[in-house]
Amino acid sequence: PSSMAAAGSVKAALQVAEVLETIVSCCVGPEGRQVLCTKPTGEVLLSRDGGRLLEALHLEHPIARMIVACVSSHLKKTGDGAKTFIIFLCHLLRGLHAVTDREKDSLICKNIQTHGRHWKNCCQWKFISQSLLMFQTQVLDCIMDQYLSRHFLSIFSSAKERTLSRSSLELLLEAYFCGRVGRNNQKFISQLMCDYFFKCMTCESGIDVFELVDDCFVELNVGVTGLPVSDSRIVAGLVLHRDFSVYCPADGDIRIVMVTETIQPLFLTSGSEFILNSEAQFQTSQFWVMERTKAIMKHLHSQSVKLLLSSVKQPDLVIYYAGLNGISVVECLSSEEVSLIQRIIGLSPFVLPQASSQCEISDTALVKFCKPLILRSKRYVHLGLASTRTFIPHCIVLCGPVQGLIEQHEGALHGAFKMLRQLFKDLDLNYMTEANDQNDTSSPLISKNSRESNQLPEIGNGSLQSPRQDTAVKNKDKLEKTQTYLIVNSNLVVSNVELEMYIPCSTAKLTPTGTFQTDETLRCLSLGKNTIIDNCEPLIESNSTVNSITENTRIEISYENLQVTKIAGKDSMLPVRCELPDMCTSQSYYSSSMPAGCVLPVGGNFEILLHYYLLNYAKKCQQSEQTMVSMIVANALLGIPKILYKSKKGNYSFPQVYIRALHALQTNQPLVSSQTGLESVAGKYQLLTSVLQCLTKILTIDLVINVKRQPQKVYDQDSEDEL
Amino acid sequence: MSRLEAKKPSLCKSEPLTSEKVRATLSVWKGIVSSCYGPSGRLKQVHNGFGGYVCTTSQSSSLLSHLLVTHPILKILTTSMQNHVSCFSDCGLFTAILCCNLIENVQRIGLTPTTVIKLNKRLLRLCTNYLKSEACGCRLPVDFSSTQILLCLVRSILTSKPASMLTRKEIDHISTLILKAFLLTIPEKPEDHIILGKSIIVPLKGQRVIDSTVLPGILIEMSEVQLMKLLPIKKSGALKVALFCTTLSGDLSDTGEGTVVVSCGVSLENAVLDQLLNLGRQLVSDHVDLVLCQKVIHPSLKQLLSVHRVIAVDRIGVALMEPLSKVTGTQPIGSLGSISPSSYGSVKDLCTAKFGSKHFFHLIPNEATICSLLLCNRNDTAWDELKLTCQTALHVLQLTIKEPWVLLGGGCTETHLAAYIRHKTHNEPESILKDDGCTQTELHLMAEAFCSALESLAASLEHDGGEILTDMKYGHFWSVQADSPSAVNWPDLLSQCGCGLYNSREELSWSFLRSTRHPFTPQTCLPHEAVGSGSNLTVDCWTAKLSGLEVAVETANLILDLSYVIEDKN
């Protein structure tokens, strides 16, 4: 059984992801199509929303379920990117799988027992997953901050005040809705959203408005079935999803109050006991209740209250007196509606006094109008809520021939607000550049220096040696080339002051072979170029730095020219190894932030850029597993633009676009995009990190155990113990 | 205890429209709806085989509500139609058939969904712009100074529902009644916002259709015995009315959540009854003549009231409360205590009436926009169908008052529109395409599919094997009887076009609708006299048909865009 589960991780995950990819990729991008889902209740739902599709599938496979859970937690944050998530994950898994396949052919694994190999594999996956995490925390943010950021555009026309012009919002939204709404409605819905945005916003609006709209989106729109989508519109004020219990027309500003309990005093409150001794007593108490209700309603009237909003059902008596006093009543508001009204106009429910006959209404508010709104022969309450400093309340009336379509549009609009909410936030990028890392680098170091390659798995902790050995042999002849490249590099950064300090140190330490030495100095230079060692500390520190450098170089070399290492490493191994335990890693923490409103043109720009810079990084990277991870991520990134350009031909086909982009980047020319539209960088970045986290999760699972038991409720064990 | 069960995985099918089963299902559905279409449409009998209710109908609304569809794609189609019908009451079959035709035709031409959807949208825009434009050749303005067009509209609706089994004479009678009922709901005093009243349809099954009638005010049905008790009505002239929405049965009102401990010998029922009787005395002293209650009135209170010659009617039901409050001008009373005099209302007169075997209590208002339409038909199913038809007609009249146009009926709008699209796409394809990335060939293919969908929709009006022609001047719809000799002089066989606007005396040339024709410019502006002399035209509701067209194309686009169907099997 364990061997069955051994296939568990990557291969199974890849199979699952590929199935999901085929479903999801049909809905991606502007050319994407719709999927029809039926609910168990018989309702039909139309969707291009990846998250919804994945949920509708009710997948059984444990890994699939894990992936879906990851996607939905990502969606909760960002509201976008479920489809890209799957595609990207799938490509990452493919990349990893390719690495494994190569490994299988290699000599090392052949003489190891199957069972043992499984565990070895697991260790290896765990190792990769760790380097993935490291990649995410160190490399990704670094590249975003140092390279990618120069390509970012800002959605704001003026960055300081965060003003947003209509045209740029349109570009952003059109691109967003392209992936979320059916083709015949993309433009319309995007315009609707744009209108809504500008109608609701004041010049002082900030992120809080997005939060408000995002939180209360359900209350801010009304669905009307049976009308064409083009009848959708925006109405000023708030539309409550119910009718008046009493409607008394009134002009001018209308004073409103809100209650959360019945106005008619309860005959008896809970827990109390009422002893009736005579019929008259009962009648008196009934009379008191009646008079009290009457008095309260009269009082409301005297305060010129014209509308009573109630979250509970009011008794007939209250309704009657409300009508007599010219007060309109809306009952049974949901708690969400109550809180929305509270948030917009700051009206809190008034509390009925227990004893005194006269009550003071502490909180009233004014609305501009209050009238019935008839949509498709159903009546709603239309409230002209006054606007606040930051928000002018408006509602969207969404029309569509079927409920499923309205839900799709509602979901897309909601997602768009989530996306904007993210976009309006600064994104913190924290990264730590480590000059060395004990765990990761020490083991390859040892193994490479030992000449008996067959014993490798036993010595090392079963990690990444083998692919490197493979390539090492292949790359033998590339040695010359690499060296020339490195020399070029060194010429470039000679002026770096900090590095000059290290060079003598390292040369002093590692003298054995000439080639090695040169290589290493060069490595130092390229390291310096990346400005990793920023907090340059005194000479004591420099010793350790040198260690790290030597190590890194070594790995790099072993990757590219095995022979050199073999000769060179023999002598140098011991001193280096000795210093490993007390090696103090020189780390530099950076925290930078991506300003709010960063966007890139659509059409795979983000992916291609990141791909390019990751490859560049990988070329320079000393740590081989980081190189590998970067390569895999970089290549997987291309999967998305590949799908986007699938239907394009000729000059607009993917290879052409890709080559043009690379050329532009190499020659420092601006990238030219064939498509109009913008997308949020923060969203893309978050997607990337979510996928990497999901992949890490998948990789750390070694065994999937299938239990043939009905699902059970999970009880909190502690509480049971206490009992 | 809640039972947890593992969810079954869903069933996922790709490219649903290519499956043979789906195509077959769609064509069966199309067969059902298109065979119902029009005045000569065939009736459908829907029953469940277990002795349940049998429904005989040709209307989309009852057909859709009785049929049970399971296939997801068909479900999208039917819910879309149902939603349209519940919005507009009319043009459900039109929408359904057009949608099916479009899907079928588009599949035949084999363009990619992207192109199809883009072009469909363009063509739809072309149609709606045309139908909304002044130059539209198939739209008539409604002249509210005469009843002619409105009568035509109602009559067209009645004729197109053969399941209500009306003769020509009965159609005329019911049409006038419906129009009368509608006019009664329009307030006499002009105000800023006109709020239309309500026509209440009162069932009177088993009577002759000719006995149907319209009365202003409200009819409350009651048994003869009850009615005898109420009589005689004492005075003439206006009567004071009190309308209760709370129960007067003497039930204990809600006492809250605590406990009530009642001492021995104390009767709460008596206490409440005392209260009720006090209320009764107040009503009497306020000179109320008529007490109406939504719920039940306690017999003792009834007794008290009748002693004082106050008429009490209870169990009115919630449906009549709003009209009653409107007719009498009362504020529904929700209190057993003191009643504010301002909540009383009045009626002009009160009488009893007997229609067929039923007895009614008739409230005649001073002036109100509520009327009762007593509707008779021979049997239950035919009555149900007639009632739906009347509701449709009343709704359509309301829609027409908002947007005062009608479209030519009898298939003429469809053929005319098809001719217009052909002409436009042929002569100015660039203006339609605008740089959309579609080629002219694609546009022509799609326009052909779109036009033939419209034309075969018009052709489904013919169920008796007749031949359909179209003229080459107006692009109207002409039908020839099935057994007529071929190759004769067309004007001899044709009398007038589908809508009745043109007759064959004019110099026209005809061609078969199915045959290919050269695109021609259909004459757009209507002759002025046609607008006035429309004594016997077939016309359709403009609002409903326009929306139906949009919904049909949108739904077709939706279905054509499907790449997967995920069925939840739980």
Image: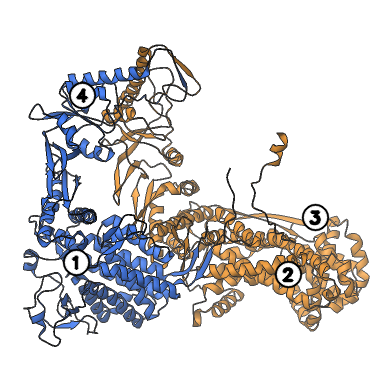
Quadrant assignment for the C terminus of chain A: top right
Identify the amino acid type marked 3: Glu
Residue A150 is situated, as x and y percent measured from the top left of the image, at 58, 64
Q: Residue A19 is drawn in which quadrant?
A: bottom right
Give the residue number, with chain letter if any, for mark 4: B341
Q: Amino acid at mark 1?
A: Pro
Residue at (71, 63) in percent of width and height: A699
Q: Is residue B196 visible?
A: no
In the image, residue B118 sits, relative to residue A345, either above or below, namely below
> Do the residues at pointers 1 and 4 share their chain?
yes
SS at mark 2 in the image: helix
User: In the figure, A245 relative to B427: above or below?
Assistant: above
- In which image quadrant can residue B127 be found? bottom left
Tell me how far mark 2 sits from mark 3, CA to CA. 28 Å
Residue A627: image tag: 2
Q: Which mark is residue A537?
A: 3
Q: Nearer the viewer, mark 2 or mark 4?
A: 4
* Mark 3 chain: A
> Which mark is nearer the camera, 2 or 3?
2
Q: Which residue is mark 1?
A: B39
User: Gap between marks 2 and 1, in whole Å?
Assistant: 77 Å
Q: Amino acid at mark 2?
A: Thr
Camera-side mark, 2 or 1: 1
Q: Quadrant of residue B82?
A: bottom left
Q: Calculate the distance from the C-alpha at mark 3 to the C-alpha at mark 4.
A: 93 Å
Q: Is residue B316 left or right of residue A586?
A: left
Q: CA distance from mark 2 to mark 4?
A: 89 Å
Which chain did the image draw in blue? Answer: B
